[in-house]
Image: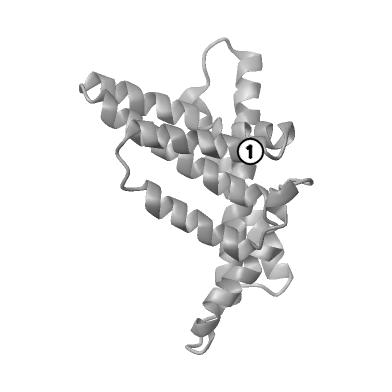
């Protein structure tokens, strides 16, 4: 599995995981209702500044994580241009990039174990109701781990397609990617069962 956190996360890595997750939630709540392209563009620049404050490696990693959104943003923009609502599409795209960028920043600068500690602490009251919070924390971990892994596999499939054809891969890699995801899920399930998991 892929380790998401940067080896040198600078000042952001020294901040408590709980504070960063709280800041992420606050930023999401604040940005969601905003409809001004200027404010959202400013927010996106601010996110870029956060990455830049950690150096070139962090900036490159941040851009790489946002790269899969480029095609989605292009489709959304073209659709809104076609229906005569470019401003609305621009707002949606800027908001999407800013929110995902902030989430990636928190993920890159926070160790997974620290995030799990925060989640388990928040879920502790549920233990009194008989809820197995470890399973919830495990599910959260797997989601965080699998997302970038699938992104990397999608890139690998795209590169393999480009090596064999001049046409764009596009939708043609969807089925192979789904099969790879199912295969990974089976392998993880077998590993969990072998270790006494559910």
Residue 6 placement (x, y as % from top left): 73, 46
Q: Where is residue 21 in the image (x, y as percent from the top left)?
A: 55, 59
* Residue drawn where x is 55% and y is 34% of the image: 66
* Residue 120 located left or right of residue 112: left
**In the depicted structure, whether residue 43 falls above or below residue 118:** above
The residue at the point 65 percent across, 70 percent down is 117
Residue 176, visible in the rendered structure: no
Along the viewing direction, whichever of 7 and 146 lies nearer the viewer = 7
Give the answer, above or below, for where 194 lies relative to 72. below
Residue 90 is drawn in which quadrant?
A: top left
Q: Which colour scheme is used?
A: one colour
Please give the name of the residue rendered at 64% of the width and 43% of the height, measured from the top-left corner.
Answer: 149
Label 1: which secondary element = helix
**Mark 1, residue position:** 51
Q: Quadrant of the C terminus?
A: bottom right
Question: In the image as oriented, which residue stretches furthest toward the bottom?
Answer: 128
Q: In this view, does 160 lie above or below 22?
A: above
Residue 73 sits in quarter: top left
Q: Quadrant of residue 36?
A: top left
Circle 1 Cα neighbour tier, 10 Å, few/some/many (<14 / 14–19 / ≥20): many
Q: Please indicate, yes or no, whether residue 109 appears anywhere in the rendered image.
A: yes
Residue under the image location 35 percent in, 32 percent down: 37
Q: Is residue 74 left or right of residue 47?
A: left
How far from the left and from the top, in percent, is residue 14?
A: 72, 57
């Amino acid at each position: 599995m892929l380790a998401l956190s940067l080896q040198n996360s600078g000042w952001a890595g020294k901040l408590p995981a709980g504070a960063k997750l709280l800041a992420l939630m606050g930023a999401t709540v604040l940005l969601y209702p905003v409809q001004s392209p200027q404010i959202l563009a400013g927010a996106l620049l601010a996110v870029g500044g956060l990455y830049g404050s950690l150096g070139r490696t962090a900036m490159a990693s941040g851009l790489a994580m946002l790269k899969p959104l480029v095609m989605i943003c292009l489709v959304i923009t073209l659709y809104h241009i076609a229906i005569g609502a470019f401003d609305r599409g621009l707002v949606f795209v800027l908001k999407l990039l800013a929110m995902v960028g902030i989430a990636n920043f928190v993920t890159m600068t926070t160790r997974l174990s620290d995030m799990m500690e925060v989640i388990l602490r928040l879920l502790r009251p549920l233990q009194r109701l008989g809820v197995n919070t470890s399973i919830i924390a495990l599910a959260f971990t797997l989601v965080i781990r699998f997302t970038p892994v699938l992104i990397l596999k999608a890139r690998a499939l795209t590169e393999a397609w480009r090596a064999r054809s001049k046409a764009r891969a596009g939708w043609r890699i969807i089925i192979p990617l789904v099969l790879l995801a199912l295969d990974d899920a089976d392998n993880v399930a077998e590993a969990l069962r072998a270790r006494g998991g559910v």
